[in-house]
Amino acid sequence: MDKILKKALKRIKPLPSEMKKEQAIAEEIIKKIRSIEGKHVHTELVGSMARNTHLRGDRDLDIFVFFSEKLSREEFESEGLRIGKMVFRGMEWEEAYSEHPYIRGNYKGYEVEIVPSYRIKSTAFLKSSVDRSVFHNVYLQKRLAKKQLDEVRLLRQFLKGIECYGADLKASSVPGYVTELLILNYGDFKKAIKAVSEWKQGEVIDMEKHLAEHESKKRFRGAQLVVVDPTDATRNVAAALSLNQFSRFIAAARAFRKKPSINFFFGKKTKPWNAKKVASALEKKEIIAVSMSYPKTIPDIVWGQLKKLRQQAAKELERNGFHVLAGSEWTDEKKTMVVVFELDSLELSPAMKRTGPEISDLKSSARFLAKHRKLVSGPRIENGRWVIETEREFCRANDLLESFLLKIKRCGKANIRKAAKRHSSVLSEKKLLKFYSNKKEFQLFFTKYLKGKEDFLSC
């Protein structure tokens, strides 16, 4: 294992020349901001690059511009945007949104975010969620030992390799800040991986002992993992972690300890299947999909809406008797998004069996029989209950999803409604194969979906 970790670190640790260039660019931007007249009181580099826990090739710089807490929210936002735009004058930039708007763009080959933040004394005086970031910087810079910086890098790359990194809605995984806290808590990469392999659902890590264990579980009920923010006891910094990603982290940690491999860090490349192989796989499965145009908003919002769209469509399918075996979503974050469903059957019989209340329940029996008058068969008695058969509204999943799309066009959320009106269609097997052949970005996702095997199990 030690040989593998050494080999991985050699590939992921930034070169001295790279670090020197990063620092020079950060200082150049900070100097530029300080020269701009305005109401800002301080400028600082934050994030993994500031803490020297970033990976080779990372070209993301988070520059925070601080304002007095007395400044109104309106002025705070307008000043933050004004300064950001001035930094990128003559360059590519766009307005993004977290809790408030900010400017991000490309600065000499680096992806730079200029984020406004309030200058506050402690997290007890938060006026914006990003105000915590500088306290994370101070906390970790004081406590992370120099030798632990590389341990963070190893854990971060491990998570990237198993596709379990990032707090955005697309990933729903482990945030970068949590990787640093895990190393701080457990000591090094190997100890952290051992601990993770033994985690149970609802695991609590409270490094500063802010809360009693029962209080943590009560306050953060439903969280897969609770990592209490050392700088703010009210926040679980692992809240974004989904059950699937929490489970993936544990399973991958166990697999790595059992059989260490460099592939856990860099993944095993999956080659998209050719159309013939996809067609063969579709013959053995009952798969249907919905495609729509991409909404005009930021990716993190779209991923949240796309996941919700899949859940809504799955409920409609189940409510009408179609059993959903699996489902997933994909988007190129430019033009198209797709929701895929695997069903036990794409077509059902015209009649649907409904089991009612026990015969002995007079009131419920009366309501049930009064509600269902147009029957294919029944009412009859089975196991002491009323049983009827009614005509299905939809016998084909294709028809149901077409109807679902019409509903979305009429009363879906604004972004999704507009996207569906621009373009939406149900992709049955033939159309899905054509879409697969014409959409290269979709091919890797769909190949992995059809394989249905966790990549780390092949490491």
Image (tube, rainbow, N blue to C red):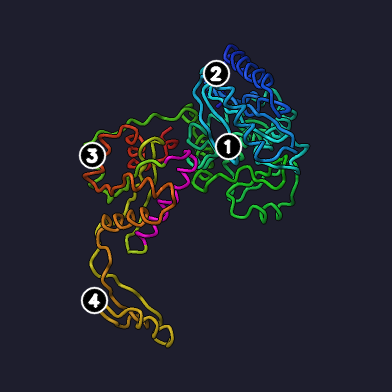
Q: Label 3, on which residue?
A: 434
Label 3 environment density (alpha carbons within 10 Å; few <14, some 14–19, many ≥20): few
Circle 4 — which element? loop
Circle 3 — which element? helix
CA gap, disc 1 and disc 2:
38 Å
Label 4 environment density (alpha carbons within 10 Å; few <14, some 14–19, many ≥20): some
Residue 199 visible: yes
* Residue drawn at x 59%, y 50% as measured from the top left: 223
- Stretch in magenta: 296-318
* Residue drawn at x 59%, y 49% as measured from the top left: 200
- Mark 2 or mark 4, earlier in chain: 2
Q: Are marks 1 and 4 in contact (CB under 8 Å)?
A: no
Instruction: Specify whether 147 is left or right of 438.
Output: right
- Mark 4 or mark 3, earlier in chain: 4
**Residue 101, disc:** 1
Residue 390 picture quarter: bottom left
| Mark 2: amino acid | Lys
| Mark 1: amino acid | Pro
x, y percentage for residue 164? 51, 37
Q: Label 4, on which residue?
A: 376
Vertical side of 421 occupied by 15: above or below: above
x, y percentage for residue 112? 56, 25
> From the viewer's perspective, is the residue at label 1 or at label 2 nearer?
1
Q: Label 2, on which residue?
A: 10
